[in-house]
Amino acid sequence: MAFWWPLLVLGFAYAICKFLFMLIPPNVPSIEVDASDVSDDGNQTQENGFIYVPPRGRTPQAETKVQCYEPATMKYLGYFPALTPDEVKERVAQARKAQKIWAKSSFKQRRQFLRILLKYIIEHQELICEISSRDTGKTMVDASLGEIMTTCEKITWLLSEGERWLKPEYRCSGRSMLHKKSKVEFHPLGVIGAIVSWNYPFHNIFNPMLAAVFSGNSIVIKVSEHASWSGCFYFRIIQSALAAVGAPENLVDVITGFAETGEALVSSVDKIIFVGSPGVGKMIMRNAAEMLIPVTLELGGKDAFIVCEDADVKHVAQIAVRAVLQSSGQNCAGAERFYVHKDIYSSFVSQVSKIVKSVTAGPPLAGKYDMGAICLQEHSERLQNLVNDALDKGAKFVVRGSVGHIGEGAVDQFFPPTVIENVNHTMKLMQEEAFGPIMPIMKFSTDEEAVKLANDSKYGLGCAVFSGSQRRAKEIASQIHCGVAAINDFASTYMCQSLPFGGVKDSGFGRFAGVEGLRACCLVKSVVEDRWWPYIKTKIPKPIQYPVGENGFEFQESLVEALYGMNIWDRLRALVNVLKILTEQNSPANSKRRDD
């Protein structure tokens, strides 16, 4: 006890000191970001206040400008240039110059950059969410959940563990290389290119940017033509934070445009990260293949939401509605197929119906609405076609939510939350990604049937399984072919930023977030060096030196058995033979014969 007592005292004192240091706020400077031209103060000029009618039947690629408008109100927000391939390549070249400087930066400087961003985000949550809401139609609550919390979680994880996972990692050298030290080094790749979707304009920019910059890269991000207005404002935040830590100009860049702009980016960078549809993802892969550029593809999903008969129906119903209506309902790349055990099917549908009846869609900044607008032009028409196809094949409406007071001419930007039953896998609604506020519910009888239904999809992003038995839920989830799984919850995997995120099949491949996503921004280099340099160095044994001796293969054969033999006696016997051959080879008589 006398020996342990001082150690316990020291440990307790260390814990107290660490706690006290936590109470001391870090010295993080504040940054100023001009938001005067993006604040909706109700006094917009005519130029920025008229109702915008997007052109129909024309391909946006023919435009030289990216036109921006609020999907909920159709108010015009402004425009940004559609960059040409030459302009994109010039921006990438500038980012490449900046990266060579930033690659030499310290982790202390990189952490300070993250802290400055975190401080600004926390202090300006309302502004960030309002801008996201105006550009995509989502509600303020959904913007906070999907934009603010996820980004703050990623920053805090990088601050806590990022440096640890980018330091050299020592590995076992094996039996034949005991005199060597083996390690893996993680060096920045150079310029990362990211093409991101519109559904989370703030987080989708910050997610790849944080990993790329913290690992020593520069990054050029092409924002969606459907969310360029917000993306270009969020870029100002990043620029101000970089300037505050003395980072080189052009380390991070945000570009706007259409397909031509994205294609030019793919052919110019050292790696591409894409978030979008499978069709565009395949085109990006083809373009990247020309230059052998690595890609990470996150291509959406058609996630299965499985509810067993022993689950808490009332609790799960609330989660289910949130899952399908998240981010105003227009951003649901998650739960799109609901499988409910036949014994609780009726009660689950009843609970869901009660909740959906209370949900109202409407302009998110104009009132207290649960759901906002559909961001994509004409997307509500596609959603209705999916519903009509299901109804034609025998599905039935259960309930639809309501649409609140909206401006005339903007009705097609809203789609009421909809619950449908009697669905099956012949319906497009159960096979194609809807990306909308529709909940199709299907019965199942056994766990095996639930797994079979969940795997009957070309997508494989994630799943959620609910059961009163956690062991049962885990067993079902383990059999579903997907990249992420939540047990008795939905989307919790993404809030754990230490975990990799991504899917299989048409949901893409590669991972971002977590250790895997951070290291995916790196050149992974294997390095071997002498453990006891210069005292012990690699020396080629005489039997296999040139010219190779007559007993060269016998020596190798015995050496392999000595190192890797199946039992100790065979290995010892082989080792004796190795030593015997070396002794004979080094004898004066043998050396004379070799000289002759």
Image (cartoon, rainbow, N blue to C red):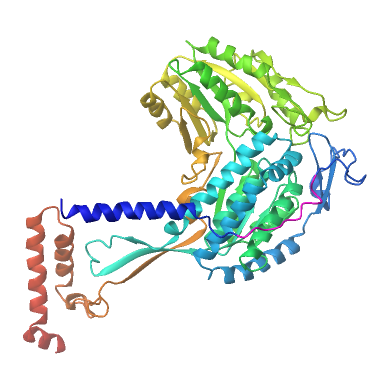
Q: Is residue 423 magenta?
A: no
- Examine the rendering and report whether any part of residue 135 can be seen: yes
Q: Is residue 336 left or right of residue 198?
A: left
Residue visible at 64% across and 41% down in the picture: 277
| Predominant SS along the magenta part | loop
Hey, which residue is sitting farthest right in the picture? 46
- Examine the rendering and report whether any part of residue 272 can be seen: no
- How many numbered marks are there? 0
Q: Which residues are magenta?
A: 29-39
Q: Is residue 170 left or right of residue 134?
A: left
**Quadrant for the C terminus in the image:** bottom left
Image height check: is 134 above or below 362? below
Residue 559, quarter of picture: bottom left
Image height check: is 457 above or below 122? above
At which x and y percent is residue 9? 27, 53
Between 195 and 497, the one nearer to me in the picture: 497
Residue 193, quarter of picture: bottom right
Between 199 and 55, the one nearer to me in the picture: 199
Q: Is residue 38 magenta?
A: yes
Residue visible at 23% across and 70% down in the picture: 179
